[in-house]
Image (cartoon, rainbow, N blue to C red):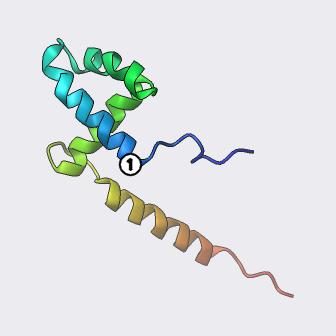
């Protein structure tokens, strides 16, 4: 079984891709077309670029939603509490 993180891009790659889309967004009629024009440069699907754009807007406070850092903290707390709820195995 492969890890879920094997295909994830580094934060630097994401940041660069988001900047590319923002730079080229005014050259195209929609954000989707701008993302499609960047696909060959980034090597990731246009849908992924759109998701990264949405997340960057949420993180910057320009769009409603849960910022990435808060989502990561919440996920860590959920894992912690799930581990506490598991019954201890008697030896």
Q: Residue 6's spot in the image, x, y percent?
A: 60, 44
Image check: 10 left or right of 7? left
Residue placed furthest toward the top: 29
- Give the residue at x 35% y 30%: 49
Image check: 16 left or right of 48? left
Quarter placement of the C terminus:
bottom right
Residue placed furthest toward the bottom: 91
Image check: 58 left or right of 79? left
In depth, the one of 71 and 33 nearer the eye is: 33
In depth, the one of 43 and 55 nearer the eye is: 43
Badge 1: how crowded within 10 Å, few (<14), some, or many (20+)?
few
Quarter placement of the N terminus:
top right
- Give the residue at x 25% y 28%: 21
Q: Secondary structure at mark 1?
A: helix
| Pointer 1 residue | 11
- Compared to residue 83, the image places residue 6 above or below, namely above
Quadrant of the rendered image containing residue 23: top left
Q: Residue 8's spot in the image, x, y percent?
A: 51, 43
- Give the residue at x 60% y 46%: 4
- Give the residue at x 46% y 26%: 43
Q: Residue 81's spot in the image, x, y percent?
A: 53, 73
């Amino acid at each position: 079984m492969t890890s879920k993180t094997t295909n994830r891009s580094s934060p630097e790659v994401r940041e660069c891709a988001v900047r590319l889309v923002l730079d080229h967004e005014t050259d195209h009629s929609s954000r989707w077309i701008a993302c499609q024009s960047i696909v060959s440069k980034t090597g990731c699907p246009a849908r992924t670029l759109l998701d990264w754009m949405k997340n960057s807007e949420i993180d910057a406070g320009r769009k409603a939603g849960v910022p990435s850092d808060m989502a990561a903290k919440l996920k860590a707390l959920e894992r912690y509490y799930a581990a506490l709820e598991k019954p201890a195995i008697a030896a």
